[in-house]
Image: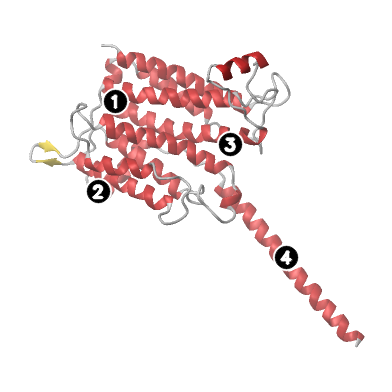
Amino acid sequence: MAANETMQDIKSKGILWGFGVLGIIVLVVLIILGAWWGSEPGQFNIIDEAEKRAKETHDTENKPIGYVYTNTLAHIAEVLLHKPGGYITNDVGPPGVLLDNVPNWEFGALVMLRDATSALRNHFARDQSQSAEDPDLAVAEPYFYFENDSWALPSTEAEYQKGVEALHKYMERLQHYGGNIKQAQFYSRADNLWQYTEVVIKRLGGLSTRLTANSSGSNYGPGLTDLEIEQADKQGTPIAKVTWLEIDDVFYEARGASWALLHILRAIKHDFKDILLDKRAMRTVDIMIKSLENSLEPIFSPMILNGDGYGLFANYSLTMANYIARANAAALDLRDIMNRG
């Protein structure tokens, strides 16, 4: 009888040990996957990606103005969909559902993608306000505005992929002629770039303000008194309170936005080269690009530090805000230059 009880105890302990080992293995796998999926995508070469797409359509020699810009938008969307772990914002299972920083990074990049696609549809591909919009761009833009966290019926990935395919159709039409008339148009004019720059200024300004409000010592921002906060509330421009749990959310949203805008600006530098040189604005675009490149330097801390003043620890939010503010100042200059006769 005692021997039977001993055997049962051994079996019970063996089962518990088995579940314990299995649980540890699953936990280790989830941690490794989470670290892999949680890494930020690297930068890509906009010209190389345009070359790859042209080879797929067997028309490598013909890459008209606007081809690189449009392909850059399509590839940004493809990176969002096909990076390690795929699109994570709408994940409902581990480890994706446990990751916090990547969804914010994806949202920041998505906002910039939406703005650039809207500019392509409403400005770059239209000769004037009374001209008809491009049919493929009219299809592509709304797909990128689909809700960003839909898991199924339809999924966010499926809708964004339709937007990518519509952009590819526009690119193919941009390459070809019907008779002697191009089937699609792209107008790299100063007024078109000025209108898009207006949107970029607002996006960068908003990100810079939110990052600055992450400063330690005050949930409302550095150096603000209670009186200043009260006056801002009365004027209808309340200063958003940022809790310590949201510090990394805003930071990674800004990282994603900087990553996407960096590639978009490189494409603008390529496709708007003539007008930028004519207006002597190439240096201004280079300043924006360099500032965004600096904002994407590798992070060596396992967490987003929020140091105070000249203390021992850095303040990542203020560092990011500084780079974005510099890019925003250059964007203001670019707007003014493009707006001159």
Q: What's the distance in space between the residues labelled 3 and 4, CA to CA?
A: 34 Å
Q: What's the distance in space between the residues labelled 1 and 2, CA to CA?
A: 24 Å
**Circle on res. 332:** none
Mark 1, residue position: 272
Q: Looking at numbered disc 4 in the image, what kind of residue is underneath it?
A: Val
Sequence-first tag of 4 and 1: 4
Mark 4, residue position: 21
Sequence-first tag of 3 and 1: 3
Pointer 4: residues within 10 angstroms few (<14), some, or many (20+)? few
Is residue 59 visible to us here? yes
| Left or right relative to 222: residue 111 | left
- Viewer-nearest residue: 258 or 241: 241
Mark 2, residue position: 57
Q: Nearer the viewer, mark 1 or mark 2?
A: 1
Whether pointer 2 and pointer 4 mark residues with C-beta atoms closer than 8 Å, the reply is no
- Viewer-nearest residue: 240 or 283: 240
